Amino acid sequence: MANQPKNNGNFISNNRWLITAATFTFLLYLLLPVLTPFLIAAILAYICDPLVDKLSKYGFGNVKLGRTLATVLVMLGIFGVMTLLFLIIVPLLQKESLLIAERLPALIANIRTGVEPWLQSKFGISLNIDSTHIQEMITKNWKTAGGLFGDVLKSAGSHGLALIGVMANILLLPVVLFYWLRDWDGFLASINQLIPRDWHDKSVLIAREIDQVLAEFLRGQLSVMLAMSAFYVLGLWLAGLNMALPIGLVAGLLGFVPYLGIATGIVLALLVAALQFTSFTQVIPVLLVFGIGQLLEGMVLTPKLVGNRIGLHPVVVIFALLAGGQLFGFAGVLLALPVSAAIAVGLRHTKTSYLDSDAYLK
């Protein structure tokens, strides 16, 4: 019994890193609801840090921009791009709403002419739709859409804490992003000092390889987004679809979130096509554009531009996406490739150590 405290002390000392990692993981799990803005800011800071490093070295004569001013400029660029996308999407939705209000009666009349005789003969169903009344309802609701904000404010009382939490996260994001970007190199230096000296060289080597792989992944994903945006814009324009430019840009740029870009693009394109075209045969080219786009992205661009850059075989890329979705849902699909790339780096080093070990050489 007298040796029990000593044994406990040895156990804690021998497993201190495992205990520290488990405690840190548990704290992350508990704090996950409040970590969202910090994680998003950290990801944006990781992506934009090289740009801040380059801008901070520019200047006039001996006067350099400095890291603080470079951080401000990069943040202005980020929010400028977000504002530009917002200005593209909102007018698109507004214009489509007005088109629906204007052309819905004609669309309903075409549906009744083409579908109602078949339903009547086969099932005895008659479509008693008053298109004029529906148009009046849409027009009235569109004109009073400005009162929606007031309704939201009225209902905010019952969900006040949730609304405050969302607003706090939105306001906190740029503040956290500023400090992450400005002090990124300092954070990395602090972490570097905490690495045990026996592990330092190997840890730094693996971290640099993971950083290189993730940087290649981001460049490859950006290349895919730009290529798909150009493809959708050109394809929808050749299909004769109105608003091909904004719909193609939205479908391509939202491609960094799996399935979101293609789903949003198809919904918007079909809405415009239903109001613009008079027959289904005219809609077929629009559907073909998205079908060919999915094949091009999934079978050619992503494996070539993303898979090759991060050192993963196309089959592994497909398996990683499926496995990530099966294990962790939407977030798993989103993080499947970068996490797989980081794991691949660790496996390469493990393989090298194994091939040099006595267990293999014997």
Image (tube, rainbow, N blue to C red):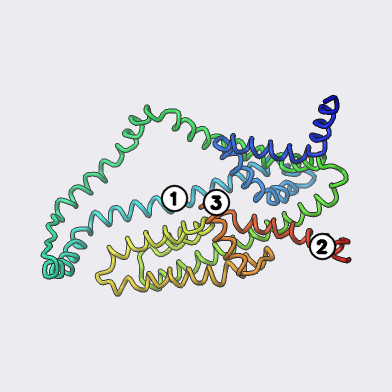
* Disc 3 packing (10 Å; few <14; some 14–19; many ≥20): few
Q: Nearer the viewer, residue 78 or 56?
A: 78
Residue 157 percent across, percent down from the top left: 37, 27
Q: Quadrant of the N terminus?
A: top right
**Residue 232 drawn above or below residue 200:** below
Residue 214 percent across, percent down from the top left: 68, 56
On residue 47, which mark appears?
none
**Can you name the residue that lies furthest to the front here?**
1
On residue 87, which mark appears?
1
The residue sitting at 18% across, 59% down in the picture is 105
* Disc 1 packing (10 Å; few <14; some 14–19; many ≥20): few
Q: Nearer the viewer, residue 110 or 206?
A: 206
Q: Dot 2: what SS?
A: helix
**Can you name the residue that lies furthest to the top here?**
2
Q: Which numbered disc, 3 or 2, marks the residue that appears first in the sequence?
A: 3
Marks 2,1: beta carbons within 8 A: no
Q: Which numbered disc, 1 or 3, marks the residue that appears first in the sequence?
A: 1
The type of residue carrying mark 2 is Thr
Residue 134 percent across, percent down from the top left: 18, 51
Task: Mark 2 vs mark 1: give the one in front.
Answer: 2
Residue at the disc numbered 3: 328
* Disc 2 packing (10 Å; few <14; some 14–19; many ≥20): few
Residue at the disc numbered 2: 352
Indicate left or right for 200 with 209 as reference. Answer: right
The type of residue carrying mark 3 is Phe
Task: Mark 1 vs mark 3: give the one in front.
Answer: 3
Residue 330 percent across, percent down from the top left: 51, 52
Residue 174 appears in the picture as rendered:
no
Real-space Cα separation, disc 2 to disc 1, in angstroms: 52 Å
The type of residue carrying mark 1 is Leu
Q: Quadrant of the C terminus?
A: bottom right
